[in-house]
Amino acid sequence: MTEEKNQLIQELFLLQRVAQRINANLDLDALLEDIVSDVAETFGCSRSAVLLKDDATNEIVIAAVRGWTVKYHMKGDRFTIGEYGMVGHVAATGETYYAPDVSVDPYYQVSEHLTRSEVDIPLKSRGQLIGVFNAQHNELNAFSPDRIKLLEALAGHIATAIENARMFQKERREKELMQKELREAQRIQLGLLPGTPPVIAGFSLGGICLPSREVGGDWFDYIPLPDGRLAVVLADVSGKGMGAALLMSSTRTVLRLACEAGQPPGEVLSHVNGVLLKDFPTTRFVTMIYGILDASNRTFVFANGGHPHPLLVDSGEARFLATEAGLPLGIQEGCFSERTVHLEPGSRLVLYSDGVTEAMNSSSEQYGESKLRSHFAGAWATVETLLDDVRSFASGHPASDDITVVEIQATEEKPHRQG
């Protein structure tokens, strides 16, 4: 009796271990290998296996097996449901089947010479067959009714573990596919940004765009105009992620088509706004600064559609440049006033997205306009030093928005009409 009690305790421990593995191991192959090994050892089975149903072929496939002395069947072998052996019979009926003496059983097919008794139990999830649990023993009538009930309880846990692991694998595959698509989208989006800045006598230009996610809604560009002037644009689509990136790409196309004729900035923004009012979702909008740099007379004429005011640094003084009118694009019809800036040698004009001024540290303090102005008051300041300063301020706090900066710096080199 003591030996029987010890065996029962071991079998109950097995049931507990399998139940624990349901959440601890989501690798289906490793999970099933562990289970069949544990069952074979605990029950003294000559063979223990799990076969999974392939709905596409109406077959069951050996997914894990332990305890062979002769390898009649290997992992990956397939059997037609209802046609091969006890496992095929159980898969067809959905009911447990026990052969206390396999030598006289009509369904038995030899898979292990030492086998004298065998039990096969259906694995079900939500009432649907997903596989068969197989246990064989080298003694006649080795599976008592109580042991079969225990194995049926074990099979229930195995079915749950299989479904959990499959769901995890599906989610992992979907996540991997999404990551792959995001990397491809990021590669495409980065390709839409300018590479090296254009070379213009009398000016030095630099820009950078850092999405807070794989892709984002910020964008900047340098667009050569037919008369030799240079259009400079910085825009920010509301929202984040893939949706914002798609709308940014559309806005880029619209803007590039609108500025081909070299029209004044206010007219260009009006045209883009009209297109976006027709095509953009009602909950989305774009803030944008669009300006034209004329190197021959050192002027930058710009219009602002709801974007943060550009920062002009001249003679050691830094000030923000407002315009009289200009709502974000895609909200309603309106006009966009223009402002002309004279850029004398040594002066700098900084365009930026709100990801700079709204960057937060761990205390929920924003970088703000004052820090931006103070930073560029130094003659040594560049786009790169600004980004370093913002990162230092945030102290590892993750960016919640895209960060984009463009700097136009007037140099001592003599400007001339391009083209």
Image (tube, rainbow, N blue to C red):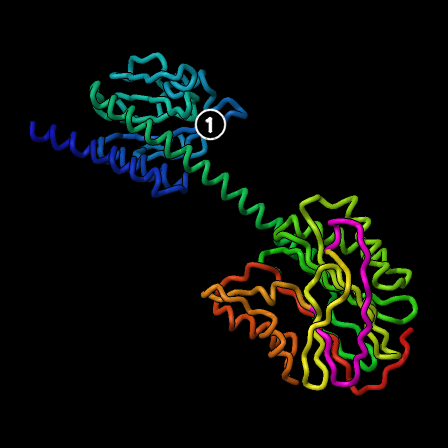
Asked whether the viewer can see residue 208, the reply is no
| Rendered residue at 48%/24% (across/down) | 59
Give the answer, above or below, for where 7 lies relative to 409. Answer: above
Q: Which residues are magenta?
A: 328-351
Judged left or right of residue 319, residue 399 is left
Q: Which residue is mark 1?
A: 78
Q: Type of residue at label 1?
A: Arg
Q: Position of residue 266 (x, y in %)?
A: 83, 61
Q: Is 25 included in the stretch rendered in magenta?
A: no
| Rendered residue at 60%/67% (across/down) | 357
| Rendered residue at 32%/31% (across/down) | 157
Nearer to us in this view, 58 or 351: 351
Judged left or right of residue 324, residue 57 is left
Instruction: State the quadrant of the C terminus.
Output: bottom right
Instruction: State the quadrant of the N terminus.
Output: top left
Q: Position of residue 112 (x, y in %)?
A: 32, 27
Q: Position of residue 365 (x, y in %)?
A: 50, 66
Asked whether the viewer can see residue 175, the reply is yes
**Residue lying farthest to the left in this orientation:** 1
